[in-house]
Image (cartoon, rainbow, N blue to C red):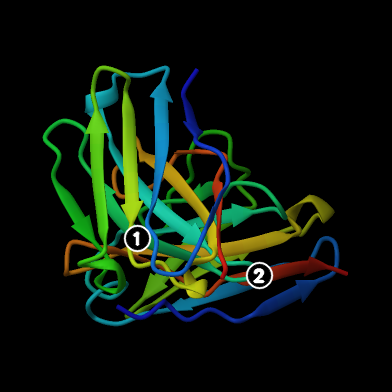
Amino acid sequence: QSALTQPASVSGSPGQSITISCTGTSSDVGNYNLVSWYQQPPGKAPRLMIYEVSKRPSGVSNRFSGSKSGNTASLTISGLQAEDEADYYCYSYTTSNTYVFGTGTEVTVL
Amino acid sequence: QVQLVQSGAEVKRPGASVKISCKASGYTFTTYHIHWVRQAPGQSLEWMGIFSPSDGATSFAQNFRGRVAMTRDTSTSTVYMELNSLTSEDTAVYLCAREGPITYTLDYWGQGTLVSVSS
């Protein structure tokens, strides 16, 4: 099972919107609406930001939103803030009854 | 409050095995699955496998099949992950995580256990 493909880095100025893509296959992202996104600040554990493609857990800002088209899922951060600087990972269930993470994206606020 | 507390850092020789513990508290141990994830230095997260504390069922990533085992001690609410035939490429932080009420996601994480493999 290969890792889902994400851009290595994305940057934006405060207040702007950025989008992170996550490309998989018909065996993972494309087959289920079970994509989630995690935020991992340096040296810390990941935090769930989006689940089931577009749902937000309690306590997560509505500046974070998710979507999916075919084999590609996306995470959008609106109104970018300095506190959003972190690594972001997508995560999907697969047809092999396993899970797979994305390659990770470093978000920088300019 | 929910907590997952892992065992301490390990240093191993190539070819050795390592066994890491993950002690759960703050919820009913057998209710939720535990996942194991690793992160090599400067690298991305890598899913290793899932363990069901209620019946001991497992599913492993292809990369680890044949050299990983997951077990539990229900009396202490602890899950164990053992990885065999270590190489330098297994040097990483190993994390346990709970799949909570929102299924197919990970809501609580252990603090991580650094495993260093070096001759």
Tag 2 subunit: B
Instruction: Say above or below: A40 vs B74.
Output: below
Mark 2 = which residue? B42
Q: Secondary structure at mark 2?
A: loop
Q: Secondary structure at mark 1?
A: strand
Instruction: Say above or below: A57 vs A81.
Output: above
Q: In what quadrant of the picture does the C terminus of chain A appear? A: bottom right
Mark 1 = which residue? B48
Instruction: Say above or below: A19 vs B32.
Output: below
* Res A2 quadrant in image: bottom left
Q: As rendered, which of A33 and B27 lies closer to the eye?
A: B27
Q: Residues within 10 Å of mark 2 (few under 14, many from 20)?
A: few
Residue at the (29%, 19%) spot, across then down: B28
In this view, the residue farthest toward the right is: A110
Q: Residue B30, image x and y in percent?
A: 22, 26
How many numbered dots are placed on residues in this image?
A: 2
